[in-house]
Image: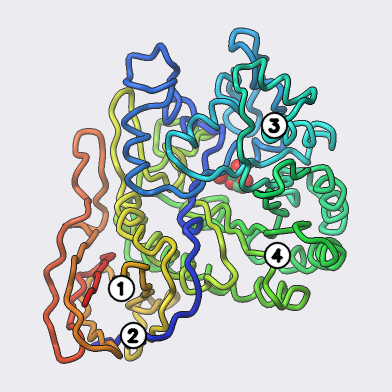
């Protein structure tokens, strides 16, 4: 039996709500169809945004939404996406399926979406193929409230008030699709471009995100920190975050692997690869510590999730994949890792919000389903803004196959401002339940609520004709025991248990 000891007196830091952030790119059916259907659509919408999707996302308490990419960001020219729709320039989305992008969803539509969701904004600028002037003018267009050419243009396009840009990404994956740069070259470009990302609202300065590494490219992290941050140290707000991108491809980037058909080997390989996030944060964090021991620069994991072979019969450039209980485990494991690293990780954005990669929602025409990942994000929302509590798991065995061994249980624990403790646990075994003895330092706790996401079969997923196969259900497998509780976690499950006095 595993033992989980919780010190309810020891707060280790704040879990920023932004760790539960999302990402939406002009890719496949994420923006178009998935979110934006246009005002004239027969699908119920408000100002073009699907009402079902917005309502479902609001239940997740989405804290922040990154847009417009991804690789698309470094090819996006924002002026093509403003003004009367009939006059907007069309372009080829060369990265994603070569389809025509009609730019009907642009800056105003993105801001409208964030306002409907009540979330913070994270706009990713174009450093790869855009100019400094273009980036600078975009920031002026969005955030300047006085009289200026760009602010006047915004007003002419129907928006009097300046918007708030909470985060601004200075390029995306500039080691790859964003310009194939070397770390030193990018870091010098970052220094130049960020200079012109002006703060027009001094009370709410824009947080600037510098492009960080791909997976375990420690050379990139070191090079960028050396060239950009050592200089940045002198200026407040020069670099607020460094991004990290990491996707779980069970069979590697070329082959990837099926989203729905997997054996025990692929199950453990997938979960083992999800656990690698912990190593990545630790190692990149150690490099960041060399330059920034006070942790002024946040680690921003602005792309994470599973990336499988796309669903048979769909456009390979659209990255549409199903989402099973295995994805729920990847989400549960990864979010526990982020919580535990909340001293450095201040934002993370699941890729991507609707119809792309590890989406929380899938749509088909007017139908919408919530994926198992949605239900995990929903349970874990209680960690948003809470304090991480010291917790330690002992006696949990390692399980798996010859090549892929994983801990049977992972966890994280937080204390909300309302005094409620949220414990989230994952049983990574594909076949065996696990008992966990959960002990608290303090006395007198009772279970306020307990939920579980799992499936009768761990390959289960939600589809348009069976939308509720995997949902959040009440969890009853616990009993009180002295200063704690004994839980029985079913195989392949994500459990949340909330305690109050
Ligand atoms: O999320 C899909 C793609 O993955 C993004 O466009 C890119 O940044 C990453 O390589």
Q: Nearer the viewer, mark 1 or mark 2?
A: 1
User: Which disc, if any, is residue 421?
Assistant: 1
Task: Report the residue marked by disc 3.
Answer: 145
N-terminal-most mark, 3 or 4: 3
Q: Nearer the viewer, mark 4 or mark 2?
A: 2
Check the picture and name the quadrant holding the N terminus.
bottom left
Query: At 58% across and 26% down in the image, what residue appears?
Result: 108
What is the spatial separation of the Cα atoms under label 1 and label 3, in whole angstroms? 42 Å
Vertical relation: 455 (above or below) 286: above
| Element at label 2 | strand
Query: At 51% across and 56% down in the image, what residue appears?
Result: 18
- Disc 2, ligand 1: is the CB inside 8 Å? no
What is the spatial separation of the Cα atoms under label 4 and label 1, in whole angstroms? 37 Å
N-terminal-most mark, 1 or 2: 2
Vertical relation: 190 (above or below) 80: below
What is the spatial separation of the Cα atoms under label 1 and label 2, in whole angstroms? 10 Å
- Disc 4, ligand 1: is the CB inside 8 Å? no
Is there CB contact under 8 Å for labels 1 and 2? yes
From the viewer's side, name the closer residue of 447 and 405. Answer: 447
Q: Nearer the viewer, mark 1 or mark 3?
A: 3
Q: Nearer the viewer, mark 3 or mark 4?
A: 3
Task: Report the residue marked by disc 4.
Answer: 217
From the viewer's side, name the closer residue of 274 and 227. Answer: 227
Query: At 64% across and 32% down in the image, what residue appears?
Result: 162
What is the spatial separation of the Cα atoms under label 3 and label 4, in whole angstroms? 40 Å
- Disc 1, ligand 1: is the CB inside 8 Å? no
User: Which disc, if any, is residue 301?
Assistant: none
């Amino acid at each position: 039996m595993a033992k989980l000891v919780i010190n309810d007196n020891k707060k280790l830091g704040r879990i920023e709500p932004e760790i539960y952030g999302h990402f939406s790119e002009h890719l496949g059916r994420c923006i178009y169809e998935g979110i934006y259907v246009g005002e004239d659509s027969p699908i119920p919408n408000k100002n073009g945004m699907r009402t079902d999707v917005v309502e479902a996302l609001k239940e997740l308490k989405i804290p922040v939404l990154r847009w417009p990419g991804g690789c698309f960001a470094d090819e996006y020219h924002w002026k093509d996406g403003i003004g009367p729709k009939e006059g907007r320039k069309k372009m080829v989305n060369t990265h994603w399926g070569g389809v025509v992008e009609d730019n009907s969803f642009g800056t105003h539509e993105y801001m409208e979406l964030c306002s409907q969701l009540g979330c913070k904004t994270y706009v990713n600028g174009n450093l790869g193929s855009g100019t400094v002037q273009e980036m600078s003018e975009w920031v002026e267009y969005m955030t300047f409230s006085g009289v200026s050419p760009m602010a006047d243009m915004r007003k002419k396009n129907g928006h009097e008030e300046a918007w708030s840009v909470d985060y601004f990404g200075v390029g995306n994956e500039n080691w790859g699709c964003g310009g194939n740069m070397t770390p030193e070259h990018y870091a010098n470009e970052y220094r130049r471009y960020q200079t012109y990302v002006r703060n027009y609202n001094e009370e709410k300065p824009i947080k600037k995100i510098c492009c960080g590494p791909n997976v375990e490219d420690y050379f990139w992290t070191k090079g960028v920190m050396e060239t950009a941050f050592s200089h940045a140290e002198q200026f407040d707000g020069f670099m607020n975050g460094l991004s990290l991108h990491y996707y779980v491809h069970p069979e590697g980037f070329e082959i990837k692997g099926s989203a729905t058909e997997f054996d025990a080997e692929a199950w453990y390989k997938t979960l083992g690869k999800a656990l690698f996030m912990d190593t990545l944060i630790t190692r990149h964090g150690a490099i960041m510590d060399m330059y920034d021991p006070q942790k002024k620069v946040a680690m921003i994991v602005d792309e994470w999730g599973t990336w499988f072979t796309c669903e048979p019969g769909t456009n390979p450039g659209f990255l549409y994949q199903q989402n099973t209980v295995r994805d729920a485990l990847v989400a549960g494991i990864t979010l526990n890792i982020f919580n535990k690293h909340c001293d450095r990780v201040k934002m993370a954005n699941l890729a991507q919000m609707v119809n792309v990669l590890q989406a929380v929602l899938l749509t088909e025409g007017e139908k919408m389903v919530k994926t198992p990942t949605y239900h995990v994000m929903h349970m874990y929302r209680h960690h948003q803004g809470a304090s991480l509590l010291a917790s330690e798991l002992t006696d949990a065995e390692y399980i798996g196959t010859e090549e892929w061994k994983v801990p049977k249980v992972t966890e994280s624990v937080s204390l909300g401002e309302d005094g409620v403790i949220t414990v989230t646990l994952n049983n990574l075994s594909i076949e065996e339940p696990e008992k966990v003895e959960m002990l608290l330092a303090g006395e007198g706790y009772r279970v306020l609520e307990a939920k579980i996401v799992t499936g009768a079969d761990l390959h289960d997923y939600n589809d348009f004709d069976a939308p509720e196969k995997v949902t959040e259900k009440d969890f009853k497998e616990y009993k009180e025991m002295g200063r704690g509780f004994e839980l029985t976690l079913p195989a392949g499950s994500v459990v949340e248990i909330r305690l109050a006095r």
